[in-house]
Image (cartoon, coloured by chain):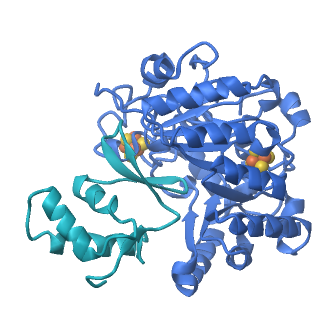
Amino acid sequence: MSRQPGPPLWLLAELTYRCPLHCVFCFNPVDFALHRDELGTEEWLRVLNEARTLGAVQCGISGGEPLLRDDLEIIVGEAHRLGYYTNLLTSGVGLDEARAARLKEAGLDHIQLSFQDSTQEVNDFLSHTRTFELKERVAKRIKEHGWPMVMNVVIHRLNIDHIGRIIEMAADLGAEYLELANAQYYSWGHLNRDQLLPSREQLVRAEAITNAWRARLGERMKIFFVVPDYYEGRPKKCMNGWGNVFLTITPDGLALPCHTARMLPGIEFPNVRDTGVREAWYDSEGFNRYRGTAWMKEPCRSCPEQENDLGGCRCQAFMLAGDAAVADPVCSKSPDHGVVEQTVAHAQQNGPTAQPLVFRNPRESERLARPF
Amino acid sequence: MNADSRPVVNSHFRLQWEKTQQAWVLLYPEGMVKLNGSAGEILCRCDGSRSIDGLVAELEAAFAATGLRNDVVAFLDHAAQQRWVRLA
Ligand code: SF4
Ligand code: SF4
């Protein structure tokens, strides 16, 4: 299939890999500490311009913690001026009143506030202590400035049994949308997968509780619950297709079809320091490699479902099967599906796992020094 | 929804003409809806100043058509359900 690809509609600007938190499911590359050379303000403004010219209209600004960039307001202001809808994805740490006011003035459209957690913070959060108070303050601030409030809580084996309390708190804080997204098993989440993957029983219970809350809250708060794909038997249509609508720019300037794709070996992704966004999107080998369906091997090549999921996630194929060009092993038709079944079987057992949780921090990152 | 209601795009949505898509799009937190031609023409007139009667008259004039009321009302019902618009 060689249709001309459409334009990128979503730009994800990862401003920095730096972050004050240490989430065990962090989606930044494991070796993030080795990529410290961040794009400067002018470079970001150029990227915003070029992507907007191509047609990008949704702009996610994330990290790391994007509030660590002093030029965040300048970047948001330019994105707004160019006509993007601007979304700030933040833990809320550092969002004091002065910055909130400046971001509002710069034209920021929306803040997604995440409840991050390490196990310590889960406890904080669940026991209404420090973290909760911080989130409460930030949530109030978000509402006072008239931003719609989307809360995102990453769900996993260690907090899923508290899901009712989590929903209740989000409702108390006045969120309009709550995303309960199960941890994804990439990067740090992959390192910690055995500790994070919930059991089937936990998932079933959590979904039932979520549905009961949906019925109770009605239109007041919309709740999204995302099941881990390990339990689905079919992969997700990752990023809605490789190089189809999503464009990520990493803190150090790599243009990627997805924020985890830099882990893939043997692909040279373009860097916006020396390549224009148009050329990166349309002409680079990296963006073209897995576009459409022509690259597929069996069983995807002759699969009647290939347009539904486009073979799933290339990074997951690489992590679990060692080859980015095979079917995503979460698919029950994949010859490598056994690795997923084993992991899932393991998650049904109780009892402690052998290896301790690895917290995301620069020291661990340098020690591990591997992409995922 | 009656003839005097004045529909207006909800404040948490932004309606915008996108040149590259040649379409009106509705933007909201982490999402976007690309509107088809008639949906776009209706929504871009929902600024709280026009009644449904006014809207229908204006559209019929703009497109030299008659009998658009049912379609307009059906779409506005749908849009209200999606919370894209509210009635001012
Ligand atoms: S997942 Fe946690 S540690 Fe990673 S960037 Fe987000 S807030 Fe920081
Ligand atoms: S075999 Fe490939 S294309 Fe078919 S459902 Fe599985 S992953 Fe999707």
> Residue placed at 40% from the left, 70% from the top?
B48
**Is there any visible trace of residue A192 in the rendered image?**
no
User: Relative to the observer, which residue lies in front, A38 or A291?
Assistant: A38
User: Relative to the observer, which residue lies in front, B32 or B8?
Assistant: B8
**Is there any visible trace of residue B17 in the rendered image?**
yes
Whether A344 is drawn above or below A39: the answer is below
Is A79 displayed left or right of A2 in the figure?
A: right
Q: Report how many numbered discs are placed on residues in the image.
A: 0
x then y, percent, for residue A74: 70, 37
Identify the hue of chain A: blue
> Residue placed at 71% from the left, 30% from the top?
A251
Identify the hue of chain B: cyan
x then y, percent, for residue A45: 63, 29
x then y, percent, for residue A21: 85, 49
User: Relative to the observer, which residue lies in front, A35 or A343?
Assistant: A35
Give the image quarter of residue B3.
bottom left
